Image: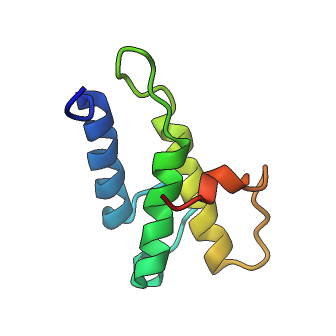
């Protein structure tokens, strides 16, 4: 394989759109979170979580892009709301930077 499958590229494109548009899981993130992501390390973690959680089947199709987006939304919420409890807690592999 020389390029990411089309489905994976589309998942990243839509994720970036929702993230920047302020519409990433609006039920969980009912606040303007974009200004909080202006630090490079926070934005780096957002994309790390999305890419670590995203699963692709043997045909190159994403199978859980909604779940990957939700895990990112949980991380953003926890960064902005100290009282929010991430459930289930993040596993080390979900937040690993590569």
Q: Is residue 89 above or below residue 64?
A: below
Viewer-side residue, 87 vs 9: 9
Placement of the N terminus among the 4 image quadrants? top left
Q: Is residue 2 above or below residue 57?
A: below
Q: Position of residue 60 (x, y in %)?
A: 35, 22
Residue 5 sits in quarter: top left
Total labels: the figure holds 0
Q: Position of residue 91 (x, y in %)?
A: 73, 52
Residue 6 sits in quarter: top left
Q: Position of residue 47 (x, y in %)?
A: 43, 59
Q: Is residue 41 above or below residue 63?
A: below
Q: Is residue 61 left or right of residue 33?
A: left
Residue 38 sits in quarter: bottom left
Viewer-side residue, 27 vs 9: 9
Q: Is residue 27 visible?
A: no
Q: Is residue 3 left or right of residue 7?
A: left
Q: Is residue 52 left or right of residue 1?
A: right
Viewer-side residue, 11 vs 57: 57
Q: Is residue 61 above or below residue 3?
A: above
Q: Which residue corresponds to the image point at 32% horizontal and 56% vertical from the top-left? A: 16
Q: Which residue corresponds to the image point at 34% horizontal and 40% vertical from the top-left? A: 11
Outermost left residue: 2
Q: Is residue 29 visible?
A: yes
Outermost top residue: 59
Q: Which residue corresponds to the image point at 40% horizontal and 80% vertical from the top-left? A: 40
Which colour scheme appears in the figure?
Answer: rainbow
Q: Position of residue 80 (x, y in %)?
A: 62, 79
Q: Which residue corresponds to the image point at 48% horizontal and 82% vertical from the top-left? A: 36
């Amino acid at each position: 394989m020389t390029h990411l499958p089309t489905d994976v590229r589309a998942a990243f494109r839509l994720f970036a759109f929702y993230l920047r548009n302020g519409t990433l899981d609006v039920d969980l993130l009912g606040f303007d979170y974009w200004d909080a992501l202006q630090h490079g390390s926070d934005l780096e973690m957002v994309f790390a979580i999305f890419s670590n959680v995203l699963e692709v089947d043997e045909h190159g199709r994403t199978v859980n892009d909604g779940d990957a987006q939700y895990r990112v939304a949980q991380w953003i919420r926890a960064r902005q709301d100290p009282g929010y409890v991430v459930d289930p807690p993040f596993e080390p592999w979900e937040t690993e930077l590569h």
